[in-house]
Image (tube, rainbow, N blue to C red):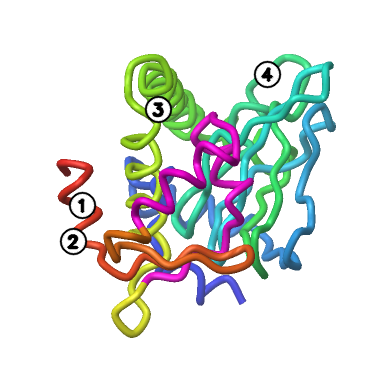
Amino acid sequence: MILCFTLRMWRLLDPLRAEDREAFLAVARPRAFARNEVLCHEGDPADSLHLVDQGHLAVQGGLATGATATFTILSPGDYFGELALLRADRRRTATVTALEPSRTLAIAATAFDALCTRNPAIERVVSTVLADRIDLLSRRLLETLYESLDRRVYRRLLELGRSYGPQDGTVAIPLSQTQLADLVGASRPSVNQVLQRLVALHVVTLSRSRIEVIDLPALERRCGD
């Protein structure tokens, strides 16, 4: 069963030697999740690290007031749970929800600890990639503080468009406008205004819980990427 997964290269495993990657994947177990199923809640005990094989997952955090924000959308090749396994309290730092039927490879905390004991390079790699997480969150914070809402929406749509990939000349992103608003740190009405301008420019079309990018090159030009 594991052999069908080893063809994918997860970014977390990129720095490892081939034999270390094989050892990592050998202790992984496939997990399947339905649309809108919660993989873990913020504050839960951390019992595994997950490599995303299929589908897309929303990573969210909340405050005691009830306010929530979506930090990022994970796609195949991404991973989550590494921070919780390195924390002293072994608690999840975010809630992760499947946006569609999804599949991961889960490495149990006990198996992860045993791997790190036998091969300290694995733990060093995991520690290193945490810097990438911090860098991403720092850049997102700077965007929120200094970039216009229009540009933030363009960037997130472009990232999602590249992740979901073209389908018959369009890219269907199965997110609601509320979910997109959470992702860019704005209100739904404000995000809707930006999207309506893109509709008028024939860059996107809108439907219930779905945004279709019909002109990805135009969106790229507006981002300047």
Mark 3 or 2, nearer chain start: 3
Secondary element type, mark 4:
loop
In the image shown, does 207 or 81 lie closer to the viewer? 207
Alpha-carbon span between mark 3 and mark 1? 20 Å
Q: Amino acid at mark 2?
A: Pro
Alpha-carbon span between mark 3 and mark 4? 20 Å
Q: What residue range appears in magenta?
A: 171-198
Alpha-carbon span between mark 2 and mark 1? 5 Å
Q: Amino acid at mark 3?
A: Leu
Q: Position of residue 37 (x, y in %)?
A: 79, 58
Location of residue 68 with respect to 107 vertically, above or below: above
Q: Amino acid at mark 1?
A: Glu
- Name the residue located 62 percent from the left edge and 77 percent from the top edge: 1
Secondary element type, mark 2:
helix
Looking at the rendered image, the disc whose residue lies closer to the viewer, 1 or 4, is 1
**Residue denoted by label 3:** 136
**Residue denoted by label 4:** 87
Mark 3 or 4, nearer chain start: 4
